[in-house]
Amino acid sequence: MRRLILLSKLRSRLLYKIDWGADKIGMYTSYEVQANERVGSTDRDIKDVITRLREIGYKYNSISAAKQHAESGNLETASFRSVPEEHPDLDQGTRITSNWRPIDCQYHVHLFEVDDRVEITSHYELRPDILNPEFSSDRLRTHYRPEWGESYIPGVYEPSVENIIKDS
């Protein structure tokens, strides 16, 4: 667990530092997570939060862009994703629920260590999944250039994630 946290922090720092170069060619390797993605915070130890996420089916996401906490400026400690069986209860007019199956999407959770607490943020989005046999360039474009509120839904999370906060 300690190794995962150290490698994740190193990955975030590296991606944050090279973002300026990626931006010059129309890409990104990091971005700031906004307050509307906040799920809540807990005084649990980061290792405990990670263990709880894994218990409810989340997997470490090593290929995501680094995220920066909007208020503290801290980089994320770790990133996890979960592939749903059904879309969350969203406005059915959103592009993500109209054009994609639940298995094509993910809940994407980020953990930040802020003031001796672990802050959890989340969004719902199309997952890039380039190894999927049904992969298409539209899928990649939609993931990396999302329409906010249409194919990237901030603040959406599985109810079981909220239990990590409530149980602390």
Image: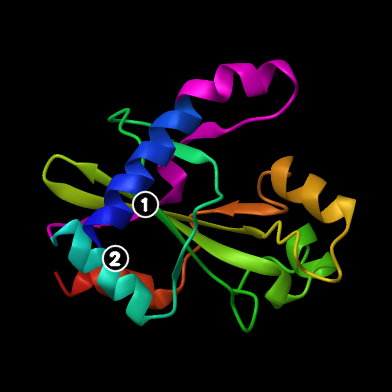
Residue furthest toward the front?
A: 3
Instruction: Kindly identify which residue carries mark 2.
Output: 50
Position of residue 73 in the picture relative to residue 109 (left or right): left
The residue that label 1 is drawn on is: 78
Does the segment drawn in magenta span residue 38?
Answer: yes
- Magenta stretch: residue 101 in it? no
Question: Could you tell which of marks 2 and 1 lies nearer the N-terminus?
Answer: 2
User: Please, is residue 96 above or below residue 88 in the view?
Assistant: above
Q: Are marks 2 and 1 in contact (CB under 8 Å)?
A: yes
Tell me: residue 34, above or below residue 37.
Answer: above
Label disc, if present, on residue 59 of the rendered structure: none
Say left or right for 138 vs 150. right
Kind of residue at badge 2: Ile
Image quadrant where one finds the N terminus: bottom left
Residue at the spot 88% in from the left edge and 58% down from the top edge: 136
Q: Which amino acid does label 1 sit on?
A: Ala
Q: Quadrant of residue 34?
A: top left
Q: Quadrant of residue 12?
A: top left
- The residue drawn where x is 11% and y is 45% is 116
Q: Magenta segment range?
A: 17-43
Q: Position of residue 74 (x, y in %)?
A: 30, 32
| Image quadrant in which the C terminus is located | bottom left
